[in-house]
Image (cartoon, grey):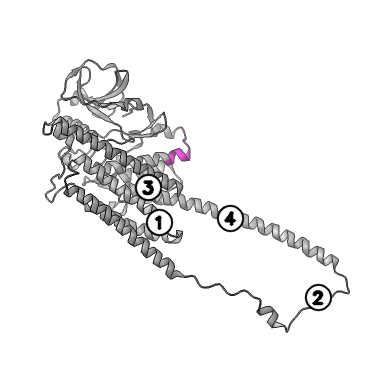
Amino acid sequence: MIDSTDDISTSGRIEPAEYHVSERFSSHSELPSKSYCRLCKVQRYGKWFVLKSLKAEYASDSVYNGLLDKEYQLMMQMNHPNVVRVYGMEEDAVMGRCIVMEWVDGRTLEELLRENPSPELRRTICRQILDALSYCHAQQIIHRDLKPSNILITRNGNNVKLIDFGLSDSDGFAILKEPAYTKAYAAPEQLAGEELDCRTDLYAFGLILQQLFPKQYERVVRQCLQPKRENRYNSAMEVAAAMNTSNKRKRRLLWWILIVAVIFMLCGVLISVFSSIYKTEKQELTPSKEIIILKDDTSSTTTNLPAPPAPADHTTTDQLLSKVKGELKHDRDSLSLVFQQEINNGIVKYYELYGYRKSIILHEFLILCQQRKAELPSSQRPVLQEYFQTLWGDLMGQFQDRDENNQPLYPAFRVLHFNGQISDEEYEQALKEEQQYSQEATRLVQVWTQNNREN
């Protein structure tokens, strides 16, 4: 699917209360598509959109209609700057029943790579892909077909937009799962037809990272591409942290090379200077002058020696590490308690709000970990990072969106409104709360990213 996007199309939301034949779309221009869907670029109110509907041979098939409905419902739950936006479902005179999506004025990552982008742009693309994946996974949504042709890069700003969620996996749509994906980017468990999780997308990201940086991040790529998913990273944020660590290691290596080069240069200068002084003094010595060597005056050679350095105080460093570990665990427990109280008080009652709020809690914990690590010497930071991974895993697993019978605990307010189960007022209030959560989640992602750049 080759969509292109234009940010001016994101200024409004189109949410028709019911399907209706619309004559308002104009300038229909068919776009190439290899899947079961048909794509068309259209214009309305002076803005460009993309309509996505089923091709004629699939239009009467209930399974493919279900897949289109699934994609619509999943995409309506998401609001992230690096995920293509969906505005609604309408009935168009030309396209029939179709999803209304934003138009992205851009090119695929596959096409961008042919332009040989700079290393900094490549790193920015990686960060944005991981941010988008982290957001999707927090919503319990797996892309299942992540590949360069499904990643758009806008021409204005070079921003990432993930597209084509037609095969996206979500427990709520398990009945509609189908074995369709791009085999070149499919994880072993996907090829084997096993149940998938977020680590399936991380496998595909490892292949994309390998294309973006063929000679860098080998360790990160290797762990992403582990055949057994339990040996891969557990989250997109873990991958981002590993890439950040690799960048720091490379910078440290470059600094050490520079320092060693400077030391050698200074040694050469000092040797030259002392050699010149020695030659001058040798020329000035007369035969009558004697050089007196004191052999027996041992006191004069020992009493003026500096005292030996005191042994390093490892206890202080260990105590500091133990203190910071305790503070980090307290941070985790405090965030967990706040979230649990919100759940108990019914503040987080919809699926969309739950996903955003959990994402906010996790990002707050990531930022707190960065702050705690800054309190430690560099030698102790990897130990704290390992401890953080344990706390992170506990926090991720503590809150679930399904009960022991695998039934959803939180209904999607968009689906409830679509089915007439909540009023327009409740729906508008939920939208407002979602927007607030979305803005806070985006802010925390930016803080976390900025901290990574500074450190």
Residue at which label 2 appears: 291
Label whose residue precedes the other's in the sequence (3 or 1)? 3
- Nearer the observer, 318 or 4: 318
Please state, as top left, top right, bottom left or bottom right, where the N terminus lies in the image: top left
Amino acid on which the number 2 mark rests in the picture: Ile
Q: Is residue 117 in the magenta section? A: yes
Label whose residue precedes the other's in the sequence (2 or 1)? 2
Q: Is residue 428 left or right of residue 49?
A: left
Q: In the image, which residues are magenta?
A: 115-123
Amino acid on which the number 1 mark rests in the picture: Lys
Discs 3/1, front: 1
Residue at which label 4 appears: 259
Residue at which label 3 appears: 240
Label whose residue precedes the other's in the sequence (4 or 3)? 3
Q: CA distance from mark 2 to mark 3?
A: 67 Å
Compared to residue 217, the image places residue 304 above or below, namely below
